[in-house]
Amino acid sequence: MNFPAFLGIGAIVIQAILAFVVMVKDPHKTENQLFSLQMLLFCCWSAAELYMIFNGVDQFGVRLLFTPALLLTYVFCIFTAVYPEPQKEASIMKSRLHQAGYFLPAAALLYFLWNGQLISSCESMPAGFSLELGRFEFIVKGVVIAYLFLSLSTLSNSRKNAETTIQKRRLRYTFAAMLLPVAAGSIVIAFSKWFIGGTTMYPFGLFPVLSIIMSMILAYTMLRYNLMEIDVIFSTGLVYTLLTAIMAGTMELFQELMQNILDFSDMWSKIITVLIIAGIFSPVKDLLIKVVDKFFGRQTFDSAKVMQTMLSELRKMPDEKRLFSRFLSELHLILDYSGARLDLKNQQQIVVPETLAIQEIRPEFATLPSDINEVDAVIQHFISTGNSAMADAGRNLKSHGIRHLFNFADSDRHYGFLLLNAKSTKVPYTSTEINLIAGLVSEIPHLLANLEMIGRLINQEKLNQEIDWARKMLQAISADSLTSFCGMPVASFTSLSTEIKGDMIDVCEDNNNSFIGVYDAFHHGIQAVLTLNVMFGVMRCFNDTRTQLHQVNSVLRRFSQQLCSAATIIRIKHRSIELANAGNPSPLIISNTGMRRLFDDSSRPAGYQEEFEPQYRSFELGERELLFCSTNGVYKAFEQLHGKTLEQFINTEIDGNLENLHQKISGAMKSLTSQNFSDDITFITAGQL
């Protein structure tokens, strides 16, 4: 067997093993499937070389060789679009139709290849062969270059979207390995054509060597940066295999030393050897872990820099759930833990993986000192304080695989716990990693406080925006200032609170349906304006007061969330007044000699219940009398801020004279509204003095 054949066989074996390992690890992942497909295409490439090495160069062998080569360029375009991070903006991944369209150039070249139109001639040479591509030479090169350009473009986008140092390293190692056979091989073939008078030279063994190098780089990257998650067996097996070999060699060495040189008996030699082994076991294990981690595991990192980077990413999270999910995902890239759990006070639990055993976390763990986080140290802490129940709780955590427990807490509040299982590699967490976790955990409460503050600001902004919308909607249906209605002088006053509780004066002057409505919706903001719009619309559909109010009650009761509104309806014809009241304070008749209520009893608002009985009254308004109708905001304002009832204020101000009574009440109300009174204030007066 010559050397090129040996290289080809070695490349097939290595790439087949890699394809098998990755597919067995997770056969459902698209990136694993594409990676294994590429490895198998490289195997076919090397197999085609072996065919020509042992059977001679012919057209069939060349076609076998170029088939996987052409397919690799297309498959590589798809692979770059899904690994190491999916690139949704990649045009080749938008749909199945796009993938088929991008495959057409490769399919055309394969058609010309197997029809004998792509390669015009080939000739055997020592350790290779020469070939002529004929008239399709530039088309072949153009298609290959186009595929490579598309892959590099996608690679560039992946590089821009990489967020952490580890993602960038994985990206750099992976694509350096994948591009090596294509780039280096193309350069060698191109230079061979220039140096050999226009003939393209293909050397046997070149691409197997390049593909072996590629496979070794990928294997190193997988082991060191946990690509496709296959480094657990390697790291654990390597540590304990070396440890077993060293311990066995040490035992043999000391037994030989004590028996042959120091002349110890066999029993004493074994006893002393076992004691020595027990003494050096842990230091040797720790040393091996450090050596394996140095070459194949996680490298030492600057915890302050990593924490700063992670915190900057966590600050971008819009809510608590996404913050903790991102926290765990970023932490996993650095620590490579086998399992983690967030147990928060608001009952939110995030477990990675989801199959991790769930156990109850005792709230007493929140009292642990900040420097105690390892489960063994936690157990010892409660043993030393005489708390056997909590020591048993710590042992329960340990039995479920928990290795570290951290508290999310600040001086004012305890948010919850972070529990970590062992690393996937089964090696202990380093002091640098523990310090990183402790630092991040101490900063999380500040991020949560910021999220709460931002949430309050957003809610306040939403409320302000809602109030602004409600105010504009209310202005569209509210009546302007009244001076007269149906020949009777009328004056109105409306002052809306900052929350818009739902007061409105409605004036309808249709020929067959003229009325004044004084409404008070039992809500605020948009819900209040919705209620008032329902009142506005329904009241105009009927010209009979009784029908109006009963229909309003029926419509408001149809909403899943109860809508209610008090209403006073006034119809005026000369000095005759028809009045209906539902839920508002009883209207008043005010004269020079005093005042009287139209209704002694209170009534229910519209929409409150199915049985609805408004109050009705028809009467003639005297020449020296005023009708006063209002919502309950007027009464509340006088009692809470003036310290007197509305009736007491009116009796004081009348003093035998009704002139300017409306202005006096309005002036008193304006002095109250400057104090940011929390309810709407609405009233009207009607009458000829």
Image (tube, rainbow, N blue to C red):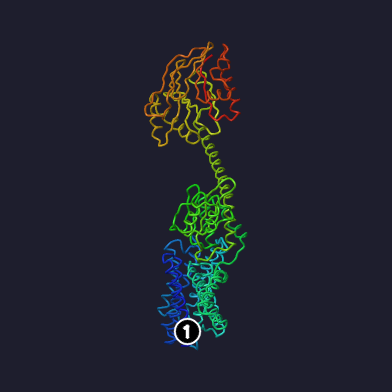
The location of residue 241, given as percent across then percent down, is 50, 74
Q: Residue at x 51, y 12 (%)?
A: 623
Between 344 and 363, which is closer to the camera in this rendering? 363
Q: Residue at x 46, y 59 (%)?
A: 399
Q: Residue at x 50, y 23 (%)?
A: 630
Answer yes or no: is residue 182 visible: no
Please indicate whether residue 546 sits to the left or right of residue 127 in the image.
left
**Res 113 quadrant in image:** bottom left
Residue 7 vertical position relative to residue 326 in the rendered view, above or below? below
The location of residue 667, given as percent across then percent down, is 60, 22
Between 682 and 389, which is closer to the camera in this rendering? 389
**Figure label count:** 1
Residue 87 vertical position relative to residue 263 in the rendered view, above or below? above
The location of residue 487, given as percent across then percent down, is 49, 18
The amino acid at mark 1 is Phe
The residue that mark 1 highlights is 6
Quadrant where the image shows the C terminus: top right
Say few, some or many: other residues with alpha carbon within 10 Å of mark 1 (under 14 / 14 to 19 / 20 or more).
few
The location of residue 292, given as percent across then percent down, is 55, 71
Please indicate whether residue 124 sits to the left or right of residue 307 in the image.
left
Residue 207 vertical position relative to residue 76 in the rendered view, above or below? below
Please indicate whether residue 422 sits to the left or right of residue 303 in the image.
left
Where disc 1 sits, the SS reads helix
